[in-house]
Structures are given as C-alpha cells and as structure tokens.
Image (spheres, grey):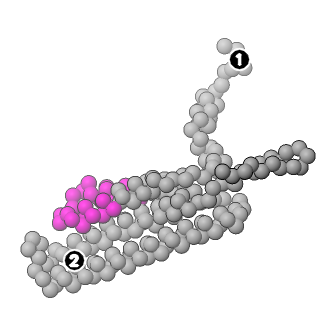
Amino acid sequence: MTSNNRKSVLQRMDVLVGWTGIPRFARQETRMRRLKWTPVLLLLFATAGLFLSLIAAFPPLWLSTLQTFPISLGVLVAQLGPMRPKDPMLDSDEREASWRIRSNLFAYGAVALVAWIGILAAGIVVLWSDLVQHPVLPSNQIPGLVGYWLVAFACYLMVLFITLPTLHASWTMPEPIEDEPEPEGGLRFVKPRR
C-alpha cells in the first residue's frame, strides 16, 4: 500500500456516511418520492391501534406502544415523501405550490371532521354512562376510560395530521416534466400518440 491510498479513520467514516445517502438528503439533492402505499399501511396500523384501545376495557401497556409507534413512522414517511419540508430559500413553481396547498387543505379538513366525530362520540358515551348502568364497569370508571380513549384518539389524530398530506400528495402528484434537450437546428420532432 502506498502512502497516497492511506486514509485516516475520519476520512473512511466520511466515505461510509456518504454511501448511506444521508448527506444528499440533508442537502436536499434527492428527488421527491411518491409513497402511495406506505401511508395507507400506516393509517391501517394506527386505525387498528385505535379500535383495539376502544375495545379493551382495561388496556395493557403494549397497546400504548401500538398507538404511539405510528406517530414516529409517520414523521419518517413525511420526511421521505413528496410533502417533506423544503428549504424556504428554494423556490417552487406554481404547480408544486398548488398541489402542496391542496394536499394540506385536504388533510386539515379530514382531521377536523374526524376530530369533531370523535369528540361528539366521547360526549355521547359520557352522557350514556350516566343514564344506563354498564354491566361490567362501574359508572365511576367510565369517565377515566373515556379519558384514555381521548388520549388514544389524540394519537390517531396526530398520525392523520402527519400522513394525510403525504398520502394525498402521492396520489394526486402530477407526472414530473422532464426537460428534453433541444436538438441541433432548433427543430423538434413530435412522436405521434397511439
């Protein structure tokens, strides 16, 4: 081995980090990915956690993990998808700005509707518990259980808030327009569509 090929430990570590793609991601040199099915699976996972928490009268500890785990996965999906936060110094064209706005408005409307339904359902359960005697739970434990349901529902709303813009943008994102180099002579031949 010659002395020119020797690298320090820090230089070798720098090369290893470069292979992971993290520096390109930090410099925002990676292209936006369409994540069509990842947010859908994440929402199904979070919905299953919500329904399991509504069914369980005395929820076990692993159920809390099932409710909070989709939040961290949702943040990762949002960072890798088409709606990731951009550098404010980079300009985006009108088309990209319009589908970002549409995706965010869709998500805000859906989260508001689901939140309204959940709060209304929690109020109905509390009123119902005062009127009807529950066969398993004493009436003094039902408000505490409703409080646990509201925490589980808040976790579900956070997953919706994080993943719905990515989901909507991935399914409605227009095809990227690739700039074709202009041929010599300034003439462009158009291929007929079939």
Residue at the spot 62% in from the left edge and 37% down from the top edge: 18
Report the Cα–Cα distance between label 2 and label 1.
Answer: 73 Å
Q: What is the magenta range?
A: 47-71
Residue at the spot 66% in from the left edge and 54% down from the top edge: 176
The picture quadrant where one finds residue 158 is: bottom left
Magenta segment, principal secondary structure?
helix
Asked whether residue 84 is in view, the answer is no
Q: Nearer the viewer, residue 183 or 76?
A: 183
Reply yes or no: does residue 58 show up in magenta.
yes
Q: Position of residue 28 (x, y in %)?
A: 65, 51
Q: Nearer the viewer, residue 107 or 9?
A: 107
Q: Position of residue 153 (x, y in %)?
A: 33, 69
Residue type at mark 2 is Pro
Left or right: residue 103 versus residue 57 is right
Residue at the spot 15% in from the left edge and 78% down from the top edge: 140
Q: Which residue is mark 1?
A: 3
Asked whether residue 118 is in view, the answer is yes
Q: Farthest residue to the top: give it.
A: 1
Reply yes or no: does residue 150 show up in magenta.
no
Q: Is residue 84 above or below residue 97?
A: above
Q: Label 2 neighbourhood size at 10 Å, few (<14), some (14-19), many (20+)?
A: some
Q: Position of residue 131 (x, y in %)?
A: 14, 86
Q: In the rendered view of the protein, which quadrant contains the N terminus?
A: top right
Q: Nearer the viewer, residue 23 or 160?
A: 160
Residue type at mark 1 is Ser
Q: Farthest residue to the front: give it.
A: 194
Q: Nearer the viewer, mark 2 or mark 1?
A: 2
Q: Which residue is mark 2?
A: 143
Q: Is residue 180 above or below residue 152?
A: above
Q: Position of residue 10 (x, y in %)?
A: 61, 32
The picture quadrant where one finds residue 73 is: bottom left
Left or right: residue 160 versus residue 130 is right
